[in-house]
Amino acid sequence: MNVEAGLRQGAEGVVATMRAIGIDVGQYRLSLYSVFSTVVVAILLYIAVRLAMRAIKWLLRRNKQIDDTQRLLTEKLIAIALFTLALLFGIDLLGIDLTALAVFSGAAGLAIGFGLQKTVGNLIAGIILLMDRSIKPGDVIVVGDGSSMGSSATINGIPNVGRVAKIGVRAVSVVTRDGKKHLIPNELLMTQPVENWSYSSRDVRVRMRVPVAYDCDLRVAQAIMVETAKANPRILADPEPVVWITAFGERAIEHELRYWISDPEAGLGNIQGEVFLTIWDRFREAGVRVPYPRTDVRVLADEGEVNP
């Protein structure tokens, strides 16, 4: 009992000392004890909310009846509710009189409102995106003109696409084909045009321009293009690859090879490169020529010049 009484007296002495250290702000006193208790309560509540969120995420991941978008939306809504309840509980636990801070909180709230306008807008936009399921983790998208993901909409004729890795509170994380991760604000996805290649179906049609010389057998060349596309494992068999004549050019008959793939996040340039190289090898074996640009220069003698 003596030890317990000594510890109690020591703790009371420390508390009294911490209460004595402080400053007076008008009719209120800001002491070291109040600051210390506020920090301790904030840390404990934060840990409690994090543990509760971890348990909720574990339970939601075990529920197979909801998809990833519904799970992510539920997690965000529960997180907002838990942090709000923790804030109100902490204020009540510390005994903070909000009426005494009405004037200050009004001015501070106005300043914070202007400062966090974009943040709140992005938060609401993220919730809307998850609710209408227009963009989901794993989707392949093109935002606006492509400048949001670091470059123009097309690179050498290939759209600058990216895979949605995560939908956060403030921004959507998009990983492009070059491996760079871009954070696009949620509000931007609500105000700019967005091409979602995975919204209704993951299948994407690829078009390739293939010129063939005039003196070649066009039916043989077309058969080679279609067979090459069908032999590639990434190209879908249904719909079947097709090839069409699109124009009679100055030096070549223009063809367009069209085929479908179901994994655009794996890259468009690589699949086109593989098909082009195989077509080139098959053309050389079959004697089909791909014309190259050429300029003919004819030198005409002047009418007044006399040939020796």
Image: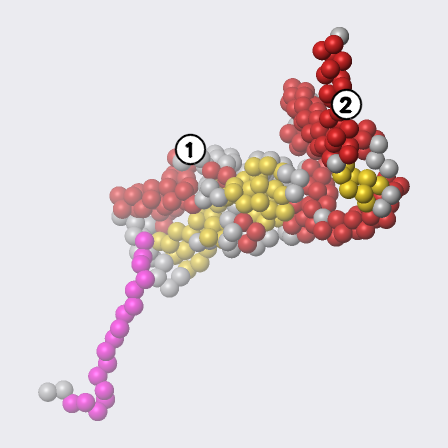
Residue at 42 percent across and 41 percent down: it is 271
* Residue projecting furthest to the left: 308
| Rendering colour mode | secondary structure
Secondary structure, mark 1, is loop
The 10 Å Cα crowd at callout 2, few under 14, some 14 to 19, many 20 or more, is few
Answer few, some or many: residues within 10 Å of disc 1's Cα (few below 14, many 20 plus, some between 14 and 19): few
- Residue 180 in sight from this viewpoint: yes
- Mark 2 or 1, nearer chain start: 2
Q: Nearer the viewer, residue 297 or 49?
A: 49
Q: What residue occupies the far top of the structure in this picture?
A: 1
Amino acid type of the residue that numbered disc 2 sits on in the rendered structure: Glu
Residue at 63% across, 38% down: 167
In the picture of the structure, the residue carrying the numbered disc 2 is 12
Q: Nearer the viewer, mark 2 or mark 1?
A: 2
Which x, y percent locates residue 300? 24, 81
Q: Based on the picture, tell me whether residue 297 belongs to the magenta stretch.
A: yes
Q: Is residue 99 above or below residue 79?
A: below
Residue closest to the eye, 221 or 69:
69
Residue denoted by label 1: 233
Residue 79, by quadrant, is top right
Q: Residue at x 30, y 49 (%)?
A: 288
Q: Residue at x 75, y 24 (%)?
A: 13
Furthest-right residue in this view:
99
Q: Which amino acid type is shown beneath numbered disc 1? A: Pro
Position of residue 134 in the picture relative to residue 262 (left or right) = right
Classify residue 254 by image quadrant: bottom left
Q: Which residues are magenta?
A: 290-306
Q: Position of residue 16 (x, y in %)?
A: 77, 28
